[in-house]
Image: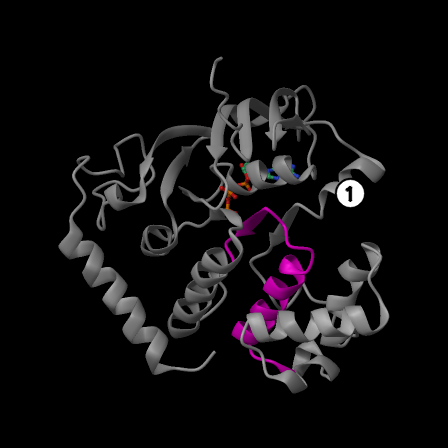
Amino acid sequence: MTATTAAPLLEVSALDVSYPAKGFRAPPFRALRDVSIRIERGETLGLVGESGSGKSTLGKAILGLTPVASGTVRFDGRDITHLKGRARRALSRDIQVVFQDPYSSLNPAMTVEAILAEPLRAAGASGPDASKRIRALLDQVNMPAGSSARYPGEFSGGQRQRVAIARALALEPKLIVCDEPVSALDLSTQARVLDLFVDLQRQTGVAYLFVTHDLGVVRYVSHRVAVMYGGEIVESGDADRVTSTPAEPYTRKLLLASPVPDPVEQAERRRQYATLAGRAGP
Ligand SMILES: Nc1ncnc2c1ncn2[C@@H]1O[C@H](COP(=O)(O)OP(=O)(O)OP(=O)(O)O)[C@@H](O)[C@H]1O
């Protein structure tokens, strides 16, 4: 009998995405070219690259928010590349997103309770069951119990991002696409929210595609890193190999250092973040 290996949680193969031409007779703009990545269950793949390299486009293609010209996106072994309508909505149980800006991603006219109740209602949970789950979610992201009756505008950026993370976690997804989720926050708040992402992964086994342009962030949260440049993945490897001061960031010069990780540097980076996390509130 031959042993079967489980499919990766996410497998993107030879993906091409083009945006419509801007000018008359101009060709369509190829934002992704032959992009392939995979993410295992419970793993974080950090996606780095300069502005405009295609990171968000890849996230959108996985979420079904932009059409794919060719290639495939497989989730849990299933081809989801062109899923639409009800089938795509059903997938939002398993694949969620946290955006960069916690100020615009939460509806300011809804209480935190209503924001968190939305995905639960869509999944058929309401009444006492939903209320219990909302209390557990707020606890999970370290928000005070009294937060549920308040509005997003009453919270800091870090606290709003915690609410956005709680909303993403509501249906226990297997994958969260995190698109620059800490870059709108100040450094000490970043450290605390990054720790939250790491802790939640340990607790729930969720996998992350973590889009960022910050090499410190990517090294802190990721198991593996893929580097994008001009719509292509130009290299990938273990996060321990990301150099702290690349001579030429985000070019075809490698960001990833020798295959031998530097444990001292790694420990120092973690210590710096831990110090920051202990120093200030969200
Ligand atoms: N809706 C769109 N229509 C046309 N071109 C687009 C569209 N969205 C993105 N682009 C272009 O596609 C390229 C990749 O954009 P994308 O947002 O994926 O890059 P990014 O690496 O996420 O950048 P950033 O770090 O600045 O968010 C850029 O040149 C951008 O101008």
> Could you tell me the amino acid type at mark 1?
Ala
Residue at x 63% of width, y 69% of height: 137
Q: Which residue is farthest top?
A: 1
Residue holding disc 1:
90
Q: Quadrant of residue 11?
A: top right
Tell me: residue 141, above or below residue 122: below
State the residue in front, 132 or 116: 132
Q: Is residue 269 above or below residue 37?
A: below
Task: Name the residue at the bottom extreme.
Answer: 146
| Callout 1 crowding tier (Cα within 10 Å): few <14, some 14–19, many ≥20 | few
Q: Nearer the viewer, residue 271 or 185?
A: 271
Q: How many marks?
A: 1
Asked if one can make out residue 231 in the rendered structure from this viewpoint, the answer is no
Going by the picture, which residue comes out furthest to the front? 1
Image quadrant, ligand 1: top right
For image coordinates 59% across by 56% down, the residue present is 99
Residue 196's x, y, as percent?
47, 66
Left or right: residue 194 versus residue 91 is: left
Magenta span includes 41: no
Residue 74, quarter of picture: top right
Q: Quadrant of residue 135?
A: bottom right
Percent across and percent down for residue 210 are 48, 48
Q: Is residue 167 magenta?
A: yes
Q: Position of residue 232 (x, y in %)?
A: 45, 27
Q: Nearer the viewer, residue 123 or 24?
A: 123
Q: Identify the magenta region.
A: 154-181
Q: Secondary structure at mark 1?
A: helix
Q: Left or right: where does residue 16 sit relative to residue 38?
A: right
Asked whether residue 36 is in view, the answer is yes
Residue 145 position within the rendered picture, expressed as x and y whole percent measured from the top left: 64, 84
